[in-house]
Amino acid sequence: MGTESDDGDGDEDGGTDIETPADDDTDRDDRVYYVISDLHIGGDEQLEEIEFLDELLAFLQRLEETDENAELVINGDAFGLWEFTTVEGVEKFDVLEETYPELFEQFRATGANIPITLIPGNHDHELAAYDEFVERFAEYNVDLVQEKSITRPVGEQAIHFEHGHQQDPNNRIEDWGNPHATPLGYYYNTLVTSRAGQLSNRGRYNWLKDVQAVTPTERMPIWLFSKYFYREMNPLIRYSLVPFLLLFNISALLAVLSGLHLAGIWTLPVEQTTSFLSQFGTAGTAAWFLLLLNVGIAGMLVLIGIPLYFIRRDIRKTINRFGVFETELTVDPTESYEEAARACFDSEPETTIFCFGHTHRPMLKEVDGGVLVNTGTWLKRLHRRDGIIGILPPVFYPSYQLAAVRIAAEPASTDAATSDSAATAATDAADETEPSRVTVGFEQITKPSPASEELTRTERFFTVGREPEPDLPERHVVDPSGQHVEPVAELISTPADD
């Protein structure tokens, strides 16, 4: 088992040594790092499917042919070992090897050209628990480092890599390398995620396997209700409910106005509505009866909802007073990582880049003169789109944000908009005495949105004009002194909301 090193939470005895793969090169200041994470490959039954396999193979093939002095860092959760519930330990590698032979052969080919470094995440923490994994991955030219974090030099600076789950109280591994470590997230994934993979193909559409794409996990109940309504509900029932749900807001308002009318306080709105609809003959009469039905139901719900609101608020206050739910199920996507980055930068002044994954949210942010970068995920991303009117369930619009983070040193005189290939050539030709700066950016890998195949007509209709356009963060430059970060314009805009 690998020796434990710094987990990024700033412990004074947790500093990491700079790790370098064993090869003949001694000068690594010009090395280019490509970083990916959160592939979540593997799992029970339907979780076996890799929807981005072609794109991943193409990315690895490009690195197989590159002339750069490059290294690929797979920054945790490459594999979904928690989601295997029928095999144990190193047997899970046998399943992976048998299920994805093309991928492992591509690892072998790419690893023959550039170093590939793999560190464990929480979903594949077992990689840190069995030395046999190191030997098995080495057969495919993948260097498995069984540590919480590693450090790499880049130019005159350094990069801290960790998956990020050690900053998440629900997924932190207290006893690193213990194969029986079971944080809260372990139970969620073995009991919920793996079960979803086993049951997914029983639905009207194979959608339940996308449970891993639901973030934060507090959205799970509403996501399940949304997919039931739009996917599993009998179409006749759904289409009969849609008019009522669309008109609910109007009906609730009319219910209040009807109460005022019956009380003789304000009769004008009801009289005007009756007069207006009477102009349309039979159609107006049908619309009037539909509104009356909706008003009756909406009125009952409003009357019931008022006391329920106060009861719910009182129950929440009581729960908060007793502190029953002090810890949220998911981790804040930025706060704990900013604190960890500050602690890392303070304890290791040469380190200016804190690179992590885990939260599935691509991010690039300046923190105390350094950069905090999240590599995102290769899984599908689901963007919540609430209804504009009525009380229809929200639509979870799918998309992909496949990307690799590229970190490289280049001469300070290189123009910020220089392309990667031109920057590499400029780096090679630069005066060795000239101070270098470090660029951190995302290389997008295009994959079309699966919305047309995965959303029903109803979902697509209610999201027309509101389709998400997820963008990746802009490229940033850390200056040679490491004292500030400056964005590089014209590349990519800031991420869109979920």
Image (cartoon, rainbow, N blue to C red):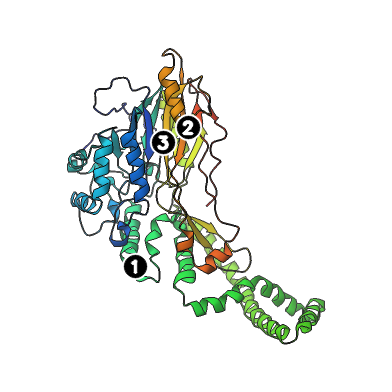
Q: Which kind of residue does numbered mark 2 sit on?
A: Val
Q: Nearer the viewer, residue 314 or 45?
A: 45
Report the residue at 41% width, 36% height from top: 355
> What residue is pinned by disc 2?
371
Q: Name the one closer to the observer, 130 or 203.
A: 203
Q: Secondary structure at mark 1?
A: helix
Is the residue 3 above or below the residue 199 in the image? above
Q: From the viewer's perspective, is 154 left or right of 248?
A: left
Vertical order, 11 against 225 (above or below): above
In the figure, 112 relative to 322: above or below?
A: above
Mark pair 1, 2: CA separation:
42 Å
Tell which tag, 3 or 1, sits nearer the viewer. 1
Q: x, y (%) of residue 163?
A: 36, 41
Give how far apart the Cα atoms at labels 2 and 3 are. 8 Å
Tell me which amino acid carries mark 1. Answer: Asn
Q: Which residue is mark 1?
A: 201
Could you tell me if the residues under marks 3 and 1 are in contact, i.e. CB atoms within 8 Å?
Answer: no
Residue type for callout 3: Cys
Q: For mark 2, does the 10 Å Cα neighbourhood hold few (<14), some (14 to 19), or many (20 or more) residues?
A: many
Left or right: 364 as drawn, with respect to 166: right
**Residue 355: mark:** 3
The percent position of residue 93, horizontal first and vertical second, equals 21, 49
| Quarter of the figure that contains the N terminus | top left
